[in-house]
């Protein structure tokens, strides 16, 4: 389905948080094999079995496995027959994020507010019920074929959603310490970043909290521009990237080519101990981007004193950056799908509210080395 590119109404310029959002409810990924994807996220990333929908629950159209780690819920969905919208989405884009579900107190109100401000409808408010209560869900489109679903679950105490049953398995590896979704980055086409910034401002009441141009995010070869949108309570943060002209193809260009359109580039998940979390992830087979070890030679000069010992940071390839509020530690996985599209960021914030601007150059050069190996730079 095409995205809504109609002009966004400009009459709603009030700064009030007219769409309160409590947090991220779940992320739904359309994947070619939900059962195997669930096993991967459990084994590699430390998620636990939570819920299931499929043939055993009377669902003959698709199969979904839900895995959980602290406040992070991933829904992994595959079609059960050919010729479906889910299958077409996977065929075009590969595995990736279809739904960013947002937890709200009133899904009908959120939908109506978004629609009168120019959103394109994905699903009108629907009440879903079972013996555990009822859930109201509604949804709108954002960039590409990605959607936001508003989830109202104050009258529900089931395991996940109506239509799902508790998924109990003997195999449940221990958590690696992932806590919640810190932010989620979208890649959009050249010239569309400001359109989607305005969309989040006007349609959902977000504010722009940061901006990076091609002088901030560039190397000798590639560049991009980014603006960070946040909701009223700061629990939802959506950086939006677009490519900038460069000598060679940027990571955003590569993403747009292989994803065949706009979509979610990476999911940043928070931890309270990045060294421990990354050590466990590495031991479970997750591969990370690496910067040259010379990055650490001047780290203390650049960011000041930190609590952590430099040696494990250097061994694992964890990056550090500081802002006026404190510092952060971050690292990025390599793409986790066959296409060079979606990846994860592991982040620990020690006061910092920014996104690692001081690491952009080193990070992008690391990405370019991977692009060169893939022959796509």
Image (cartoon, helix red, strand yellow):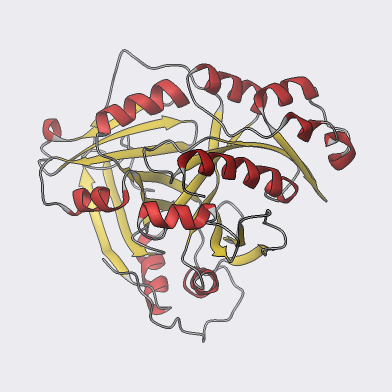
Number of marks in the rendered image: 0
Question: 46 or 343, which lies in front?
Answer: 343
Residue 263 in the image: above or below residue 158 = below
x then y, percent, for residue 54: 16, 35
x then y, percent, for residue 52: 24, 32
Quarter of the image where the N terminus is located: bottom left
Q: Is residue 92 left or right of residue 188?
A: left
Q: Is residue 204 left or right of residue 361?
A: left
Q: Is residue 139 left or right of residue 274?
A: left
Residue under the point 70% across and 43% down: 362
The answer to whether residue 104 of the structure is visible from this angle is no
**Direction top: furthest residue:** 170
Residue under the point 22% across and 50% down: 86
Question: 57 or 336, which lies in front?
Answer: 336
Q: Is residue 200 left or right of residue 294?
A: left
x then y, percent, for residue 319: 70, 36
Residue under the point 22% across and 47% down: 129
Question: 29 or 88, which lies in front?
Answer: 88
Question: 241 or 149, which lies in front?
Answer: 241
x then y, percent, for residue 267: 50, 44
Q: Quadrant of residue 329?
A: top right
The answer to whether residue 304 of the structure is visible from this angle is yes
Residue 288 in the image: above or below residue 361 = above
Q: Quadrant of residue 269?
A: top right
């Amino acid at each position: 389905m095409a995205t809504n590119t109609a002009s966004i109404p400009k009459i709603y310029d009030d700064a009030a948080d007219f769409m309160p959002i409590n947090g991220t409810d779940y992320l739904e990924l359309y994947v070619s094999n939900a059962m195997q994807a669930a096993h991967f996220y459990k084994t590699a990333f430390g998620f636990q079995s939570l819920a299931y929908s499929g043939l055993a629950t009377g669902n003959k159209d698709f199969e979904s496995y839900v895995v959980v780690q602290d406040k992070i819920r991933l829904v992994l969905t595959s079609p059960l027959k050919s010729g479906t919208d889910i299958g077409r989405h996977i065929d075009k884009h590969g595995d990736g994020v279809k739904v960013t579900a947002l937890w709200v107190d009133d899904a009908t109100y959120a939908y109506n507010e978004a629609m009168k401000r120019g959103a394109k409808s994905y699903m009108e408010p629907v009440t879903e019920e079972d013996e555990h209560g009822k859930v109201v869900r509604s949804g709108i489109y954002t960039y590409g074929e990605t959607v936001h679903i508003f989830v109202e679950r104050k009258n529900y105490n089931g395991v996940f959603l109506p239509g799902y049953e508790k998924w109990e398995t003997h195999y449940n590896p221990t958590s690696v310490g992932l806590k919640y979704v810190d932010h989620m980055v979208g890649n959009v086409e050249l010239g569309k970043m400001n359109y989607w910034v305005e969309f989040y401002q006007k349609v959902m009441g977000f504010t722009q909290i940061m901006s990076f141009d091609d002088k901030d995010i560039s190397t000798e070869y590639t560049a991009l521009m980014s603006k960070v949108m946040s909701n009223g309570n700061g629990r939802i943060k959506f950086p939006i990237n677009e490519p900038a002209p460069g000598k060679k193809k940027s990571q955003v260009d590569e993403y747009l080519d292989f994803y065949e359109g706009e979509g979610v580039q990476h999911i940043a998940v928070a931890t309270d101990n990045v060294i421990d979390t990354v050590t466990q992830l590495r031991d479970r087979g997750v591969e990370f981007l690496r910067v040259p070890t010379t990055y650490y030679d001047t780290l203390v000069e650049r960011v000041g004193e930190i609590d952590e010992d430099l040696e494990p940071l250097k061994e694992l390839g964890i990056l550090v950056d500081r802002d006026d509020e404190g510092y952060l530690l971050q690292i990025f996985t390599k793409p986790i799908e066959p296409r060079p599209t979606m990846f994860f960021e592991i982040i620990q914030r020690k006061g910092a509210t920014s996104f690692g601007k001081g690491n952009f150059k080193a990070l992008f050069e690391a990405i370019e080395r991977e692009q060169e190996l893939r022959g796509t730079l």
